[in-house]
C-alpha cells in the first residue's frame, strides 16, 4: 500500500487555502484523521464481511475482506507518516 505524499500535500494545500475554516485543535487532529478514518471504515468492511455482506454491496464474495485489508493496510501506512503530515500542515499554514 503506497502513501502518496504528493496527494497528501495537494490535499493539505487545498485545506490551507482557507486556514480559518478549522480551529487549532482541528488542524492538529488532521494527521490522526488520516489514520482513524480508514481504520474505522476497514473495521466496518471486516464486520460486514463476517456478517455475510449485508451492509456494503459486493460484486464478489471476498470483496469486503479485500476492502478491509486495503483500508487497514492504508491506516498502518498513514500512521507511519504522522511526522510528515504534521510537518506539512505546519509548513502550509
Image (cartoon, rainbow, N blue to C red):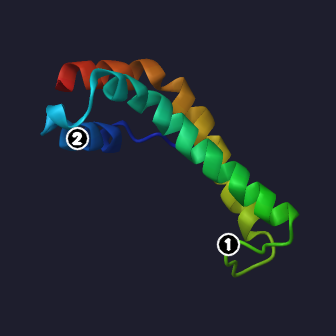
* Residue 2 at x, y percent in the picture: 51, 43
> Dot 2: few (<14), some (14–19), or many (≥20) neighbours within 10 Å?
some
Q: Residue furthest bottom?
A: 59
Say which quarter of the image contains residue 7. top left
User: Can I make out residue 36 in this image?
Assistant: yes
Q: Going 16% across and 32% down the picture, which residue do you hit?
A: 20
Query: In the displayed structure, does residue 7 sit left or right of residue 32?
Result: left
Q: Nearer the viewer, residue 54 or 59?
A: 54
Query: What residue would you read off at disc 2?
Result: 15
Q: Earlier in the sequence, mark 1 or mark 2?
A: 2
Q: Secondary structure at mark 1?
A: loop
Q: Are marks 1 and 2 in contact (CB under 8 Å)?
A: no
Q: Going 58% across and 43% down the picture, which residue do you hit?
A: 74
* Residue 43 at x, y percent in the picture: 72, 49
Say which quarter of the image contains residue 79. top right
* Residue 9 at x, y percent in the picture: 28, 36
Q: Which mark is residue 56?
A: 1
Q: CA distance from mark 1 to mark 2?
A: 30 Å
Query: In the displayed structure, does residue 62 sit left or right of residue 10?
Result: right
User: Can I make out residue 69 in this image?
Assistant: no
Q: Which mark is residue 32?
A: none
> Dot 1: few (<14), some (14–19), or many (≥20) neighbours within 10 Å?
few
Query: In the displayed structure, does residue 74 sit left or right of residue 89?
Result: right
Q: Secondary structure at mark 2?
A: helix
Q: Going 54% across and 44% down the picture, which residue do you hit?
A: 37
Q: Nearer the viewer, residue 72 or 55?
A: 55
Q: Going 67% across and 51% down the picture, which residue do you hit?
A: 42
Amino acid at each position: 500500500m503506497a502513501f502518496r505524499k504528493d496527494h497528501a500535500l495537494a490535499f493539505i494545500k487545498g485545506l490551507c487555502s482557507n486556514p480559518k475554516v478549522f480551529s487549532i485543535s482541528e488542524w492538529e487532529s488532521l494527521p490522526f484523521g488520516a489514520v482513524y478514518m480508514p481504520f474505522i471504515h476497514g473495521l466496518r468492511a471486516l464486520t460486514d464481511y463476517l456478517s455475510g455482506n449485508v451492509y456494503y454491496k459486493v460484486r464478489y464474495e471476498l470483496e469486503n475482506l479485500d476492502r478491509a485489508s486495503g483500508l487497514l493496510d492504508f491506516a498502518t501506512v498513514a500512521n507511519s507518516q504522522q511526522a510528515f503530515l504534521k510537518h506539512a500542515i505546519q509548513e502550509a499554514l
